[in-house]
Image (spheres, helix red, strand yellow):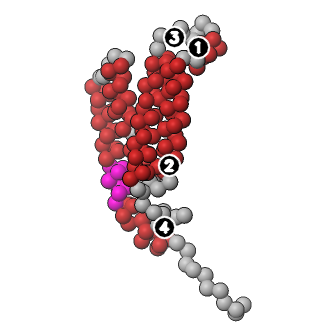
Amino acid sequence: MSPATQEPPTTLHWVALVIAIVASQAGQVLLKLGASGLPPMEHDLLASLLAQMLRWQTLLGLSCYGSGTMFYVVALRRIPMSVAAPCTAVSYVSATLFGLLLVHETLSPLKVAGLMLVCLGVVLLAEIGGKRAARMPRAEADLSPPDRAVSASP
C-alpha cells in the first residue's frame, strides 16, 4: 500500500509508539544497571560476558528492548517512519536524565548543547515531515505512472 492510500494512524498506533519509546528507554537503563559493578573484561572476556548476560537487570533490559521493538513495529503500520523515528530521539534526553539521576553521570555544557541540537532537529523533522505528509497524496499522484489503456491495435 502506498503512503497516499494508507489510512492515517489511530490513537492505538500513537500509544504503541509511546510504549515502544518507554520500553526501549527502560531497557537502556536496565542494561546500564546490569553492567555496573562487574569486573573488567580484560581479566576473562568469556566469564565477564556470561556474568553480564545472566544478571537479572540485563535479562529484563533485553526483554524491554524486545517488547519495545514489537510495539514500534505496530506503530510503523500507520505512522510514517519519517515521523516515528525522530520521535524516538526523545530517548536521548531521557537517557541523559536517567544517567544523571541513577548512575550519577556528569552533564557538561557540551552535552547540554548537543541535547539542544537533538531537540531542535526533532522539531525540524517533525515540522518538515508534517508539511510533507500534508502534500504527499497530490505529489504522489503526480509521480505515479499513467494508467495504460489496453487497446486492440498493434
In the rendered structure, find residue 38 and report the number of the disc placed on it.
3
Q: Which residues are magenta?
A: 124-131
**Dot 1: element:** helix
Residue under pointer 4: 5
Q: Earlier in the sequence, mark 3 or mark 1?
A: 3
Residue under pointer 1: 51
Residue 58 placed where, x, y %? 52, 22
Amino acid identity at mark 1:
Ala
Mark 1, residues whose alpha carbon is within 10 Å: few (<14), some, or many (≥20)? Answer: some
Mark 2, residues whose alpha carbon is within 10 Å: few (<14), some, or many (≥20)? Answer: some
**Dot 4: element:** loop
Give above or below for 128 relative to 25: below
- Residue 103 visible in the picture: yes
Q: Nearer the viewer, mark 2 or mark 4?
A: 2
Extreme right residue here?
A: 154
Secondary structure mostly seen in magenta is helix
Residue 38 placed where, x, y %? 51, 11
Say whether residue 10 is left or right of residue 49.
left
Residue 139 placed where, x, y %? 43, 69
On-image quarter of the C terminus: bottom right
Q: Is there CB contact under 8 Å for labels 1 and 2?
A: no
